[in-house]
Image: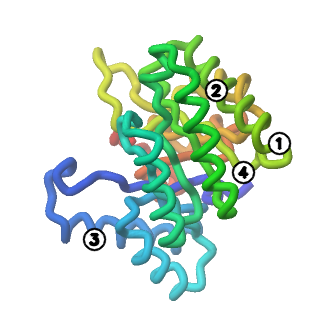
Amino acid sequence: MQLSQYLDSTYLKLPNQANISEAATKEKVLQLVQEAIEFDFKLVMIRANYILLAKEMIAKANSKVTIGTVIGFHEGTCTIQEKLQEAKEAVALGVDDLDYVINYKAFKEGDISLVTKEIVEGTKIGLDNAKIVKWIIEVAALTNAEIAAISKLIKETVIENFGEENASKVFVKSSTGFYKTTDDKPNGATFESIQIMVDNAKPLKIKAAGGVKTKEDALKMITLGVERIGTSSAKQIVEGKEINSSY
């Protein structure tokens, strides 16, 4: 098992969120892509405005690293049409993976028809363009029962509309890494939340994002059934170093 091929190396902070300049943000993205090439990570997860830059670097290095971006990030509450437009623009730039933030607030409020509609339409754009689709459910904002229910909803909606033969192209993903919790509660994947996702989303694939801080944690997540791990510290994980960041 090649651990690096499970890792989606991630940098999604805007300059104001990291309190750094545009130029410094670009340098962080360049470093992320270079590390992904050197360590043979599965994917770099970046903002859409850096897709072309990353593609150029990856092609120049003759690397197989793929590129993902986020849609409706990070609250997930923008309209379906806004999400679809973002997705179409990312597809036009040549992205490989589309990671949508599902409207988990609408789900919690009982608006299942809206959530189902965005799952169908967002997944369709991805599959029609031969892209991998991931639905971020934000486990820290949900109860265990809600994690189970939304995971099951995504699974049933995808299989009903696109067939089980496309299940391997769609993920349920735990977290954005940007959700604000109270009382120092984890804002990303936990072993408990991932197990619930595995139990309710399979045969769709599972991505654990946020909260994976050691190589041992990463390997345990894979043992639970995770196919991808999103982290801003992919290099430290493969090197066996503990990390302190929350994402």
- 6, 173: nearer the viewer: 173
Direction from residue 48 to residue 139 in the image, left or right? right
Q: Which mark is residue 169?
A: 4
Q: Earlier in the sequence, mark 1 or mark 3?
A: 3
- 235, 64: nearer the viewer: 64
Q: CA distance from mark 2 to mark 3?
A: 36 Å
Looking at the rendered structure, the secondary structure element under dot 4 is helix
Q: Which mark is residue 136?
A: none
Q: CA distance from mark 1 to mark 3?
A: 42 Å
Name the residue at 42% across, 52% down: 233
| Percent coordinates x, y for residue 77 in the rendering | 38, 34
Residue type at numbered disc 3: Glu
Q: CA distance from mark 2 to mark 1?
A: 17 Å
Residue type at numbered disc 4: Lys
Q: CA distance from mark 2 to mark 4?
A: 15 Å
Say which of marks 2 and 1 sits in front.
1
| Percent coordinates x, y for residue 174 in the rendering | 53, 34
Label count reads 4
Residue type at numbered disc 1: Gly
